[in-house]
Amino acid sequence: MTNETPRLLKISILRYNPQIPEVKPSVETYELEEGDGMTLFIALNEIRERFDPSLKFDFVCRAGICGSCSMLINGKPTLACRTLTANLDEEINLAPLPLFELIGDLSIHTGNWMRGLNERLEAWIHEEDQKEVDFDRLEEKMEPALAEEIYETDRCIECGCCVAGCGTALMRNDFVGAVGLNKIARFRLDPRDKRDDSDYYDIIGDEDGIFGCMSLMGCEDSCPKELPLQSKLAYLRRKMVVMKDEK
Amino acid sequence: MRVAYTDVLVVGGGLAGLRCATGVKQRGHDVVLLTLVPPKRSHSAAAQGGMQASLGNCSKGEGDNEDIHFADTIKGSDWGADQDVARMFVNTAPKAIRELAAWGVPWTRVHRGDHQAIINAKKVTLTEKDEAHGLITARDFGGTKKWRTCYTSDGTGHSMLYAMDNKAQEQEITVHERMEAMALIHENGRCYGAVARNLMTGELVAYIAKATSIATGGYGRIYAVSTNAVICQGMGQAIALETGIATLGNMEAIQFHPTAIVPVGILTTEGCRGDGGLLTDVDGYRFMPDYEPEKKELASRDVVSRRMVEHMRKGKGVKSRYGDHLWLDITILGREHIEKNLREVKDICMSFLGIDPAEKPIPVRPTQHYSMGGIRTDYKGESQTLKGLYSCGEAACWDLHGFNRLGGNSVAETVVSGMLQAEHIADYCDTEESEIDISTKLIKEFVDKEQAKLDYLLEPKENAESAYPLRRAMENIMMDKVGIFRNEKDLQDAVDELEQLLIRSRNIEVKHKTLTANPELFNAYRVQRMLKLALCVAKGALERRESRGAHAREDYLERNDKDFLNRTLTSWPDENQTMPTITYEDIDIKSMELPPGFRGYGKDMTITNPESKTRQDEVDKIREELEAKSADRFEIQSAIMEYKSKLPDRYNGKNERLWERLDD
């Protein structure tokens, strides 16, 4: 690797600034010498620094933890920060993640989308009453295996890749996506949340919720954290079908 | 001009800011939270290993309590910490963790019966009690006497942040995303909010508030390689500094984490070593026991980082094109343990290095990680010099960590400082004194001034400077000359060079002429501010001619309690200054619960202060007398250093443990 001539990468980026609508979207290509261990985080920063300081993109943790930098890389939604250029061809196409509000170039407003989703799903622990936690006393016990199972679903980083990779989300604007359904699966598991299936059915028991999923598995294929979305969604659907029959 | 009014303005949407906001809201005050990124993407999410709280549920945590956590924290700080603050912290940490448990964090739990663990490279069997089954467990971390670090796998910060942000959403906290605080609005020594800039549209908005809390995290990105997220540029500290009134504390106290991966500097948690991982050199030799026979890999972070550099300087590093490194070997823990308890570490190694850490060691090197310094506040979190300005979490120096922070104490601090500060802010907002009495004229002056600065950045200039080269130069100076080991010559060079960069930065011209979403523009003004912070760090380090905690001077090896048992205060009273103003604040030995002593690493290199012994004798005498009267540990503690009157009532209760039950 060290003695070989580095590859010349051709990185094409879909550029558009909605603040300046008179300038039409365009694709710009930047040529860059590949470095050892180069990620798209490194490459994009180099492009901004050397070629075009106006290039917009979002990185925060650059470690695959925060979910900020999802984009379409050669058409596939994934996290740019931990995509090694070595795993891609020399010609790389980058575009913003679809379905989310575009801030400019590769920068998208996933924050307000996710916030809206959380509010809609009331994605927080619903205690029986609003009494304050008696934090001086020993905490409530929880089965160790259950805590681990909840953590498994809690690992979602709200990057939006599952939404961008979802057929239903393309057709139905209000579809909650795998990110939303996974949240419901998470709170369903959690004994601290006092909602029952009837409550969850009221939130996701329709075509914009669990019954909108067509089982194309685009979500699981696109999930950078490799969450078991398909099995979580399938299980949730079975439970919600039961509720549908009861209601 | 857009003006928004609220009771409390919180700047920063990580754990500290969110917890402060929820606390204030619970007390019935309005709050607006400004954040650069969606709160769930804050750097708090990157905390992997865990949160310290003396629950003592697991077998290796048995017997733990606030007293032991307190002593670990003070020793860890190399006696730089504020002992009142540390006491408030250790008493509140168990409450914080239990509150978060109720809010949804899936803390990893104790499982009854036998389980295998790796301790000092040997397999041992630990037995957990029946009655502890299902309570929150803990792992071992550096510099602690007990297993005290509670966790969810190695995604602790993520789980905490999600639960906290969910709680904030439940409480309908107003969050304004992609808003950057540009300047604090103040008059006659009182802060009234901030001018903020919308990073999408470029619009300036004035937020007027009775109290303003800065919770923007650390300033690690002034270094070329840091484990910090790219947003950790210290802008909260910078706007406080730019008031000319607020002070920053101990800016030179910078922590280097022993195990960030090479070359990109992404963290692998201390939990790797806590769970039994080893550090090895070019020969595969485990070297830490030679340097620190007692604590080995689990010495305090500053100590391990220095030992690693020492070892590499002896030629024992592994050569690579990115410079020397050492190995972090966790293969001994086994695949099952790694895939369950260190899965983010595995993810990072696979993604960025192509290494499976269950099979191969990880290339690591000490890397900038944490800012002990920050906005200097009192124990309430309020600036000592600018009324109405508060700060919490890593952004602040209230001063829990002194010159070295213990692993697991940072996420704990974010939440605890947010909890305590929310009460103090709410108390303040309840008073008549807090009412806002400034004119819109004053508000307009502050907005206009920021607008003028932005316009000026875009103006064509002769000999115009570009921000990136200045920034890279700064980052490299900090790495090379203000690093783990420091000396007079390098620090003087660093100060001189940074000063020149600062002067040049006043001539930056932004080539892309738009005030809307424009990365070149925000980079430009942030570089100007980062240079000021870098100068505070370098100048503070130059003037501190001793070694304390993470501040290690090769030319002044001793910890000098005679001349430097103090906090460095930096301010910037005149905006035309090219150097910060430095003063010192003494740390009072006479009121200490734990007077300065030997930390227990290497050989004792302390220049002692005679007051230390006087105070130690006093403390010993009080303890002896009360023990003779069979006083309990709370009574003894209180007689030595009363702090409870400073702690908000709701956090004053004792903490229950399996062997310390509260009466019904």
Image (cartoon, coloured by chain):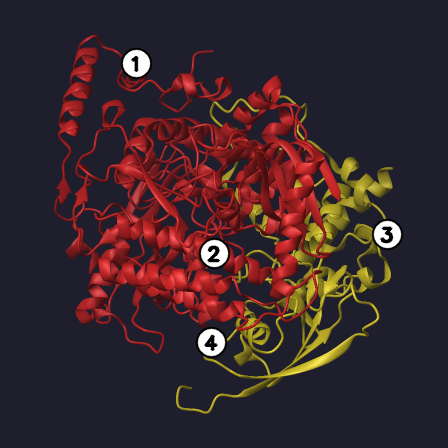
Chain colours: A yellow, B red
Q: B167 or A172: nearer the eye? A: B167
User: Quick check: do tags 1 and 4 share a chain?
Assistant: no
* Residue indicated by mark 3: A207
Tell me how far mark 4 sits from mark 3, CA to CA.
Answer: 44 Å
User: Given contact means CB atoms under 8 Å apart, are the residues at marks 1 and 2 in contact?
Assistant: no
Q: B40 or B564: nearer the eye? A: B564
User: Given contact means CB atoms under 8 Å apart, are the residues at marks 2 and 3 in contact?
Assistant: no
* Residue indicated by mark 4: A37
* Residue indicated by mark 1: B635
Residue B530, which numbered label? 2
Residue type pointed to by label 4: Gly
User: Given contact means CB atoms under 8 Å apart, are the residues at marks 2 and 4 in contact?
Assistant: no
Viewer-side label of 2, 4: 2
Residue type pointed to by label 2: Met
Give the residue displayed 83% in from the left and 55% down from the top: A212
Residue A27 location in percent, x, y? 73, 79
Tell me how far mark 1 sits from mark 3, CA to CA.
Answer: 63 Å
Residue B586 location in percent, x, y? 28, 33
Residue B421 location in percent, x, y? 51, 29
Viewer-side label of 1, 3: 1
Secondary structure at badge 4 equals loop
Tell me how far mark 1 sits from mark 4, CA to CA.
Answer: 58 Å
The mark that comes first in sequence, 1 or 2, is 2
User: Quick check: do tags 2 and 4 share a chain?
Assistant: no
Tell me how far mark 1 sits from mark 2, CA to CA.
Answer: 47 Å
Give the residue displayed 26% in from the left and 26% down from the top: B592
**Residue at mark 2: chain:** B
Secondary structure at badge 1 equals helix
What crowding class fits label 3: few (fewer than 14 Cα within 10 Å), some (14-19), or many (20 or more)?
some
Residue type pointed to by label 3: Glu
